[in-house]
Image (cartoon, helix red, strand yellow):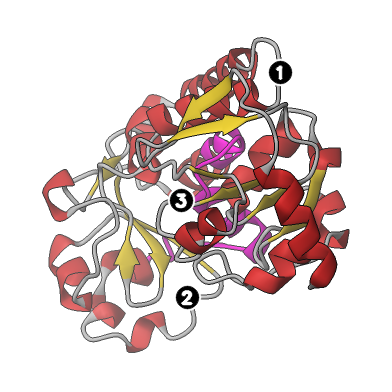
Amino acid sequence: MKSALLWLLCVCCLPVSALQVVDDRGVTVTLSRSPRRIVSLLPSLTETVCTLERCDRLVGVDRYSNWPDAVRQLPQVGGGLDPSLEAILALRPDLVLAGTSTRAVARLEALGVPVLALEPKTHADVRRVLDKIGAVLEVRDAQRLWRAIDAGVAAAAQSLPASARGTRVYFEVNSGPYGAGESSFIGETLTRLGARNILPAALGPFPRLNPEYVVRAEPDLIMIGERSAHGLRQRPGWHGMRALREQRVCVFAAEDSDVLVRPGPRLAEAARLMARCLLQHAPDDKR
């Protein structure tokens, strides 16, 4: 802890730099140079750094960051919402990447640690975050990555036959149950694939639902992760749902679920997973 405090004194003496980025709080973050020691507290931000080919600058991550494989070897500093301050300080970061809801942001800043708070929630946010992190890491033309992502989502949509379009989908994010609404980044991907989301934008991006809501909506197809799929037929009224009777359910493995629920550079891969599900399980007769 003593060495960490000495490092903080040095950080506070750094000269003002022209490298500035405005984060999602509206805070202007000023850095003396492009950071070399980064701690990331959000998996989507970890993945963005690595996809921009700066994975070697990461010195620590939250416990949920697990892609690419290289980050599994890094020190973990706890959960993204409430990480360990001591663990972060011991890694002597010159930048912490965090979500806007991370409770440790104010404490870290009070200790002199620069924090860039970014929390992508839509496709447009993913593009914007790529720009901001690209600027901080001095990556030229970070938008080339977005163009590749966007093209990948478009290709996934084009791979689907007309018969798959219009499928009414319920996408469950996690048990609760919480679903992905039209306004979420998952909902945006479904829309681009030509699917119809049973959860309208008015409910919010990730609403918590009464299980009976899904029964009444009667989706053609259910997408769900294996962590939440146990006991679907035991939910009130679900045993009689057409999607379950006809086995029109895609249960995603944990690794695929991570791809699907993270608004980051693997959006195109998520679109391909959803497209494959639609291709295999969409009914021919839409209601």
> 31 left or right of 76?
left
Label 1 CA crowd tier, 10 Å (few <14, some 14–19, many 20+): some
Q: Residue 268 colored magenta?
A: yes
Whole-angstrom CA distance, mark 3 to mark 1, is 41 Å
Q: Residue drawn 65% across and 10% down?
A: 141
Image position, residue 76 (x, y; %): 75, 67
Q: Residue drawn 38% across and 41% down?
A: 185
Which of pointers 2 and 3 indicates the residue nearer the eye?
2
Q: Quadrant of the N terminus?
A: bottom right
Please name the residue that numbered disc 3 is placed on: 281
**Can you tell which mark lies on residue 44?**
none
Which of pointers 3 and 1 indicates the residue nearer the eye?
1
What's under tag 3, amino acid-wise? Answer: His
Residue in the foreground of this view, choosing between 177 and 25: 25
Please name the residue that numbered disc 2 is placed on: 228
* Highlighted magenta segment, given as a residue range: 246-272
Q: Are marks 2 and 1 in contact (CB under 8 Å)?
A: no
**Can you tell which mark lies on residue 139?**
1
What's under tag 2, amino acid-wise? Answer: Ser
Query: Which element type, helix, strand or loop, lies under badge 3?
Result: helix
Which of pointers 2 and 1 indicates the residue nearer the eye?
1
Please tell me which of labels 2 and 3 falls first in the chain. Answer: 2
Query: Which element type, helix, strand or loop, lies under badge 1?
Result: loop
What's under tag 1, amino acid-wise? Answer: Val
Q: Is residue 277 above or below residue 240?
A: above
